[in-house]
Image: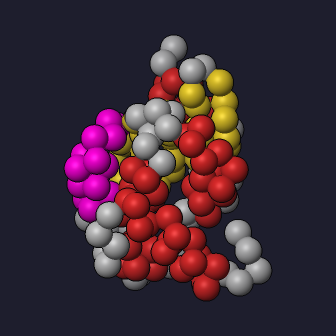
Amino acid sequence: MSDLELAKNRLKRKSLSLVIVKEGKLLFESRLSGINGLLEAIDKLSDKMHQSSVADKVVGRAAALLLAYSHVRETYAETVSKEGLKVLRENDVAVEYAVLVPQILDRTGKNICPFEKFSSNIKSPSEAYERLKAFAMKLNPNGL
């Protein structure tokens, strides 16, 4: 079974929000909402994420920028936004998804996700991590 299949199966079987697998080994899993799990994974794994396979529940533009920043090889998203898909493809991250949506919405389902909105001003993956982490801390000062 491929790393992406392992990650995808674990995501679904354990009702997780994020799973990272590399060379057949589980590197990270999370149930944190939004991009918090991905930010935590980058903090903990750093370069170990290079060429990994990632299964994520929701991938919008912000998450896609972080995945590109981390140089992941491939990703599976249960839901991906059009902008997220564009970022992944522009950065040569192979992508599979179940549902493509125009944009990621916030928890109320009425407005655009704050990270989707904020990331529209971020031009490159290299600037994404620090800016998105600072924005996440601003939204939740008590930490991830």
Q: Nearer the viewer, residue 109 or 118?
A: 118
Residue appearing at x 52%, y 24% in the figure: 3
Residue appearing at x 40%, y 79% in the figure: 118
Residue appearing at x 23%, y 54% in the figure: 86
Going by the image, does 22 lie left or right of 77? right
Q: Nearer the viewer, residue 95 or 123?
A: 123
- Please state the total of marks drawn on the protein image: 0
Residue appearing at x 58%, y 31% in the figure: 21
- The quadrant of the image that shows the C terminus is bottom right
Q: Quadrant of residue 10?
A: top right
Residue 43, given in percent of the width and then of the height, sits at: 66, 56
Q: Is residue 143 visible?
A: yes
The residue range painted magenta reads 82-96
Residue 95 is inside the magenta segment: yes
Q: Is residue 16 visible?
A: no
Q: Quadrant of residue 40?
A: bottom right
Residue 83 is inside the magenta segment: yes
Going by the image, does 90 lie left or right of 116? left
Q: Residue furthest right?
A: 142
Q: Nearer the viewer, residue 29 or 49?
A: 49
Going by the image, does 38 lie left or right of 120? right
Q: Is residue 74 above or below residue 107?
A: above
Residue 135, given in percent of the width and then of the height, sits at: 54, 80
Residue 9, given in percent of the width and then of the height, sits at: 56, 29
Q: Which secondary structure dominates the residues rendered in magenta?
A: helix
Residue 20, given in percent of the width and then of the height, sits at: 58, 38
